[in-house]
Amino acid sequence: MDVKLGRVVITGAAGGIGRTVRSGLREESDHLVLVDTEDIEPDGDGETAVKAGVGDRDALREAFGGADAVVHLAGTAEEASLDELIDANVRGTLNVLEAARRAEVPRVVLLSSSRVTGNYPIHHHVFPDEPPRPDGLNGVTRVAEEALGQLYADTFGLQVVALRAGSFGERPTETRHLATWLSPRDCVGFVRAALTAPNVNFVAAYAVSGNARRFWDLSVGESELGYRPADDAARYAGDFPDDDPFWHGGPQGGAAAGAEAILPHLEE
Ligand SMILES: NC(=O)c1ccc[n+]([C@@H]2O[C@H](COP(=O)([O-])OP(=O)(O)OC[C@H]3O[C@@H](n4cnc5c(N)ncnc54)[C@H](O)[C@@H]3O)[C@@H](O)[C@H]2O)c1
């Protein structure tokens, strides 16, 4: 398929997903604007690097000028204090959405997280429109991030796609990933689909490979974004013991869910 993506801004472009999305979309984009607090070396005339944080609204507005879309990846996947998470995941997202509105960028793709529903039990197959059950404070801020996306879609007509990413990596590295793995190829596939799908107002969809053991429903990604994942963690099943206690029950978020993970951050 011949995809034309135009001028695309990527925030958090120096991170793991950012580097993968950057190289995956490079050929299809007219120009990539790479925003991060880390240094990035632009690769020729087709890229511009902007060293800035998503707390810097003026820098964002300037970086977003003339863009066709923003892929917002700057954020934290770790559990932390609510203050830190609100800055990284909520204020940062609001600044990105507001800069997009002011710069008249039509579409924003938000990298949300499956942590939005990480407290559903492993035997529950979750659809994206089920009530949130965040598995920690990070998940709570992802609920807020998605709500901001919905607000901007409803109020200002911004086209917003929130991708609830599973566990991104070259390959699964723990048994839980047999359900939650998001391969680099599928990550790029979901982002490309989120950038190109027609008739988007607001869409929240899980971004996970087509893992046989997955917890999350993929039908919204297929019907609204037109993407069906290509990879399946099942081919790595032999790397992990069949009788791992994780599969006996408990929250989908695994070790990141539960009191032990949250308590240290409530006591700060
Ligand atoms: N990797 C995963 O499995 C996974 C799963 C679910 C959600 N996510 C989310 O997807 C996004 C990208 O994930 P990743 O794995 O590439 O993360 P990462 O930590 O590898 O990269 C994040 C990048 O964002 C940059 N950054 C952080 N704060 C910033 C700020 N205030 N302004 C500008 N840049 C900033 C960092 O310098 C880094 O380059 C994150 O929001 C993450 O929480 C990731």
Image (tube, rainbow, N blue to C red):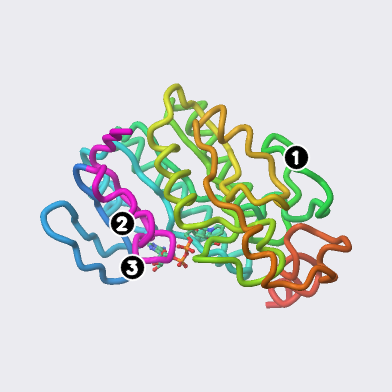
Q: Earlier in the sequence, mark 1 or mark 3?
A: 3
Residue 34 picture quarter: bottom left
Label 1: element kind: loop
Most foreground residue, 78 or 154: 78
- Whether residue 229 sits left or right of residue 7 in the image: it is right
**Relative to residue 85, is residue 176 drawn left or right?**
right
Question: Within 8 Å of ligand 1, the CB of disc 3?
Answer: yes
Residue matched to label 3: 37
The residue furthest top is: 199
The residue identified by callout 2 is: 23
- Which residues are the magenta region? 1-29
Quarter of the image where the N terminus is located: top left
Q: Position of residue 124 (x, y in %)?
A: 82, 46
Q: Residue at x 60, y 53 (%)?
A: 232
Q: Amino acid at mark 3?
A: Thr
Number of the label disc, if any, that sits on residue 131:
1
Say which of 73 and 249 sits in front. Answer: 249
**What whole-number distance in Å separates the C-alpha atoms at marks 1 and 3?**
34 Å
Q: Is residue 25 within the magenta segment?
A: yes
SS at mark 2?
helix
